[in-house]
Image (cartoon, rainbow, N blue to C red):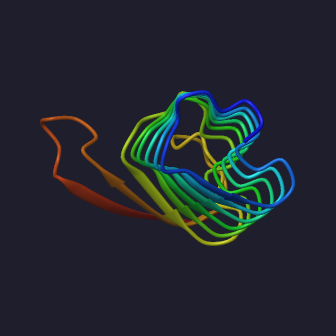
Amino acid sequence: MASNTTGSGNSATGEQSLADNTTGGNNTAAGGGALFKNTTGSGNTALGYGAFENNTSGNSNVAIGINALYNSSGTSNQVAIGDSSLYHNNGGLAYNTAVGSKPYLPILSVMPIPLLVRTRLLPTQPAVQILRLEH
């Protein structure tokens, strides 16, 4: 938290976790590089090496596992559990939940996704959709 200016309520354990944080608050980062680039994002939890490493401004996210939510930078309300879960979700839809090892995004591609739960996609769609995509 070397760059921290006014961010409060943050907790960081691990080399360069929350290193770039300036004003983001109430973040928890455990693991080398967890929430490394976070500057203004708040209410995030990143557990694991490289978890949510490239986030800058996303809020209310949970990343558990090595490189979970790795490339996500400004998306909010994501839950990624597992090795590299939601790894490529950058600027994608909000309110995603992915569980499993390497469930990659973008969501609409045909890639191995063990389980993907999407919520609040569009006002005209159901509140929750559970998708199991076979490859």
Q: Nearer the viewer, residue 16 or 110?
A: 16
Q: Position of residue 93 (x, y in %)?
A: 43, 35
Residue beneath the point at 17% across and 53% down: 127
In the displayed structure, 72 sits above or below 52; it is: above
Q: Quadrant of the C terminus?
A: bottom right
In the displayed structure, 32 sits above or below 115; it is: above
Query: Going by the image, does 15 lie left or right of 34?
Result: right
Q: Nearer the viewer, residue 119 or 80?
A: 80
Q: Position of residue 48 (x, y in %)?
A: 73, 65
Query: Going by the image, does 27 lie left or right of 71?
Result: left
Q: Nearer the viewer, residue 77 or 41?
A: 41
Q: Position of residue 56 (x, y in %)?
A: 61, 29
Q: Which residue appears farthest toward the left when viewing the image?
A: 124
Query: Going by the image, does 105 lie left or right of 31?
Result: left
- Total marks shown come to 0
Query: Going by the image, does 9 lie left or right of 31?
Result: left
Residue beneath the point at 69% across and 70% down: 101
Residue 1 occupies quadrant? top right
Residue 129 occupies quadrant? bottom left
Q: Position of residue 27 (x, y in %)?
A: 53, 50
Residue beneath the point at 81% across and 61% down: 14
